[in-house]
């Protein structure tokens, strides 16, 4: 412990801790430990390493540390009026119909326009379904309803509109005789533009969310410190 010169708290969904001495670096992946050990590691390092040598604590406290302290494996999450309980079964109900729709649509479009690459249409919803399903705890997790979160609602509407416009343009190309440039060039250009706009919008939403969480982290840090005081 006396050789540690810097501690960086990683506020990712799974949580991590980077320790650095004068000669070496190590990373602790909290996902490798049970909940009780995660909390013990966080509390121990938080108290043993000087605060001046720690970075990223506020956001880590808000996203990782405080939820660890509040965690009760026997308690089921209870959503408030503007929240919803997300479970793996719920993701199945929400996304499996879309996977089926994209699969049927991709097969029909590939057969109609003789484009085998359209068979990959269900790949994106499958990736989204798998990532959302297996990132959700077995007991479920509480999340704000879309109508209560204007930014998320606006973002999903934007993604849906962009994707619909993209598909309409690609299908519309099939009905244009002798286009000025090749069809593959047009489709590649549309794909690049679509991804660029989506990344730009995602970056803006991410910055707004980050600012909100930084503001909320101040309250989380106070709650954490109050809990340490009471336990002492």
Image: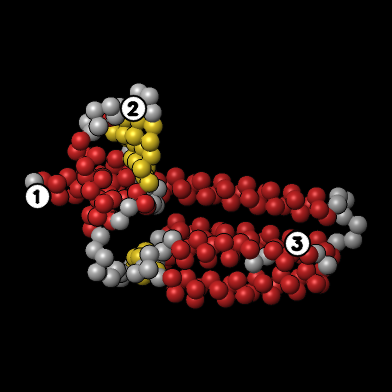
Q: Residue at x 80, y 61 (%)?
A: 173
Query: For mark 1, does the 10 Å Cα neighbourhood hold few (<14), some (14 to 19), or many (20 or more) residues?
Result: few
Distance of label 2 from label 1 (alpha carbons): 32 Å
In the image: residue 211, left or right of residue 94 = left
Distance of label 2 from label 3 (alpha carbons): 51 Å
Image colouring? secondary structure
Q: Residue at x 62, y 75 (%)?
A: 100
In the image: residue 173, left or right of residue 37 = right
Farthest-out residue, top: 22
The mark lying in front, picked from 2 and 3, is 2
- Assign the N terminus to one quadrant of the image: top left
Residue 56, x across and y down, in percent: 33, 38
First reached walking from the N terminus: tag 3 or tag 1: 3
Q: Residue at x 49, y 46 (%)?
A: 204
Residue of label 2: 21
| Depth order, front residue of 38/187 | 38
Q: Residue at x 24, y 69 (%)?
A: 74
Residue 230, which numbered label?
1
State the SS at label 3: helix
State the SS at label 1: helix
The answer to whether residue 190 is above or below residue 75 is above
The mark lying in front, picked from 2 and 1, is 2
The answer to whether residue 153 is above or below residue 193 is below
First reached walking from the N terminus: tag 2 or tag 1: 2
Residue of label 3: 117
Query: For mark 3, does the 10 Å Cα neighbourhood hold few (<14), some (14 to 19), or many (20 or more) residues?
Result: few
Distance of label 3 from label 1 (alpha carbons): 61 Å
Count up the numbered dots. 3
């Amino acid at each position: 412990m006396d050789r540690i010169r810097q501690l960086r708290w990683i506020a990712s969904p799974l949580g991590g801790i980077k320790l650095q001495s004068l000669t070496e670096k190590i990373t602790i992946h909290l996902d490798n430990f049970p909940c009780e050990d995660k909390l013990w590691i966080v509390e121990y390092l938080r108290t043993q390493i000087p605060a001046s040598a720690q970075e990223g604590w506020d956001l880590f406290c808000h996203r990782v540390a405080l939820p660890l302290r509040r965690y009760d494996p026997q308690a089921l999450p209870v959503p408030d009026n503007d929240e919803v309980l997300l479970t793996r079964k719920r993701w199945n109900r929400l996304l499996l119909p879309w996977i089926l729709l994209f699969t049927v649509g991709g097969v029909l479009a590939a057969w109609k326009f003789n484009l085998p690459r359209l068979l990959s249409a269900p790949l994106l919803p499958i990736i989204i379904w798998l990532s959302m399903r297996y990132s959700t705890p077995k007991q479920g997790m509480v999340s704000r309803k879309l109508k209560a979160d204007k930014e998320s609602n606006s973002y999903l509407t934007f993604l849906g509109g962009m994707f619909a416009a993209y598909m309409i343009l690609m299908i519309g190309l099939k009905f244009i005789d002798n286009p000025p440039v090749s069809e593959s060039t047009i489709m590649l250009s549309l794909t690049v533009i679509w991804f660029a706009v989506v990344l730009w919008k995602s970056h803006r939403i991410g910055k707004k969310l980050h600012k909100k969480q930084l503001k909320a982290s101040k309250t989380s840090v106070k709650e954490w410190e109050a809990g340490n005081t009471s336990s002492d």
